Image: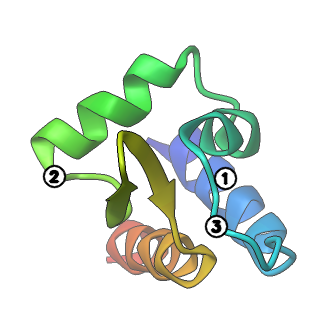
Amino acid sequence: MASRRVAVAEVAAESRDLPSRFLTPEDLVAMFELPSVETVYQWRRKRTGPRGFRVGRHLRYAPDDVRAWVESLMEGAAA
């Protein structure tokens, strides 16, 4: 559990420098060093990841939503 807290803290530091464009699932894979894009889709199905939206058939994430999600994880880890 401690390693997860460290990983969340590192991502939070990086998330302050998120791009101003909408993020793709592949962007989240790279940012969080996930094993595959399927992890992002699982988060969406389970409603545990950042809030996303569809543009046609493409999934996108607002940088502010990703930042808020990371901050909520940090708050939960601190408890």
Image depth: mark 2 or mark 3 in front: 3
Q: Are marks 2 and 3 in contact (CB under 8 Å)?
A: no
Identify the residue position indicated by label 3 in the image. 22
- Where on the picture, by quarter, is residue 29? top right
Asked which quadrant contains residue 50, the reply is: bottom left
The image position of residue 30, as x and y in percent, is: 75, 35
Quarter holding the C terminus?
bottom left
In the rendering, which numbered label is found on residue 47?
A: 2
User: Helix, strand, or loop for circle 2?
Assistant: loop
The image shows residue 6 at horizontal and vertical percentages of 66, 53
Residue positioned most to the front:
56
Earlier-in-chain disc, 2 versus 1: 1
* Residue hosting label 1: 6
Is 14 displayed left or right of 8 in the figure? right
In the rendering, at what x and y percent does residue 78 appear? 43, 76
Disc 1 packing (10 Å; few <14; some 14–19; many ≥20): few
Question: How is the structure coloured here?
Answer: rainbow
Q: CA distance from mark 3 to mark 1?
A: 26 Å
7 relative position to 70: left or right: right
Give me the C-alpha separation between circle 2 and circle 1.
Answer: 23 Å
Relative to residue 21, is residue 1 drawn left or right? left
Q: Judging from the image, what secondary structure is the residue with disc 3 in?
A: loop
Amino acid type assigned to the residue bearing label 3 in the image: Phe
Please identify the quarter of the rendering in which residue 75 is found: bottom left
CB within 8 Å, label 3 to label 1: no
Residue found 15% across the figure and 38% down from its top: 45
State whether residue 59 is above or below residue 50: above
